[in-house]
Structure formats: C-alpha cells, structure tokens
Amino acid sequence: MLRASRFIAAHSGYAQVAQLAKQALATDERISELVIARGLLEREQLDEILQPERLSGLSADHSVTNDADSAEAVPRDGMTGEFEVVPEPKM
C-alpha cells in the first residue's frame, strides 16, 4: 500500500505522508490506517482516493460480468490444460 502514498500525499501533504510511509515500513502497519489515525483523512475520503479506477486512470465498467452466460466469459471448450510435447532439435 506504500505505492498509494503518492496519491494520498496529493490530498494530505507530501511531508506528512512521507513521514507516515517511513513509519509504516518500520512498523509493518498500513499507511492507510496511519493516515486515518493521524486524522489526515476520513476513511470515506481515503476509500475514494484509493479506488482502483481512479489510481489507474481508467473508468469503471460495472456492466462487465464474468459469469458463464456472459460474452466476456472466457470460453473453456478447447482448453484441456495439456501441452503438446515438442522434441528438442538435434544438434
């Protein structure tokens, strides 16, 4: 979660978040919990900042599903899990 510290720093200040990142590394704590405990952000604000869509810059497509009837589902018909054994070339 330390990678997220740069996104948190944009909202809470670099110096404070850098100090918390060092503390998180030293104590094996989550930086998000330290930010909340220190009162820099509320949990709801932090959840909003750390949404995967926001971190990646991609918009969320909540219409995509991955069930068996979905067009997005991976077809499994031709997948056996076995690989063809190819002999090594002779030199």
Image (tube, rainbow, N blue to C red):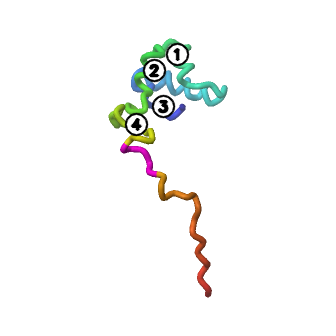
Q: Which residue is mark 4?
A: 65
From the viewer's perspective, is the residue at label 4 or at label 2 nearer?
Answer: 4
Q: Which residue is mark 3?
A: 4
Q: Which residue is mark 1?
A: 36
Q: Which residues are magenta?
A: 71-75
Distance Cα–Cα, label 3 vs label 2: 10 Å
Q: Label 1 sits on what residue type?
A: Ile
Which element carries disc 1, helix, strand or loop?
Answer: helix
Q: Label 3 sits on what residue type?
A: Ala
Distance Cα–Cα, label 4 vs label 2: 26 Å
Of marks 4 and 1, which one's residue comes earlier in the chain?
1
Image quadrant where one finds the C terminus: bottom right
Distance Cα–Cα, label 1 vs label 2: 8 Å
Give the camera-side residue of 13 and 11: 11
* Residue at x-position 50% and y-position 35%: 3
Within-10-Å neighbours for mark 2: few <14, some 14–19, many 20+ = some
Distance Cα–Cα, label 4 vs label 1: 33 Å
Residues under numbered marks 1 and 2 in contact, where contact means CB atoms less than 8 Å apart: yes
Image quadrant where one finds the N terminus: top right
Within-10-Å neighbours for mark 4: few <14, some 14–19, many 20+ = few
Of marks 4 and 3, which one's residue comes earlier in the chain?
3
Distance Cα–Cα, label 4 vs label 3: 27 Å
Q: Label 2 sits on what residue type?
A: Leu
Of marks 3 and 2, which one's residue comes earlier in the chain?
3
Give the camera-side residue of 89 and 20: 89
Q: Which mark is residue 46?
A: 2
Q: Label 4 sits on what residue type?
A: Thr
Residue 21 screen position, x and y as percent: 55, 28
* Residue at x-position 55% and y-position 25%: 31
From the viewer's perspective, is the residue at label 4 or at label 3 nearer?
Answer: 4
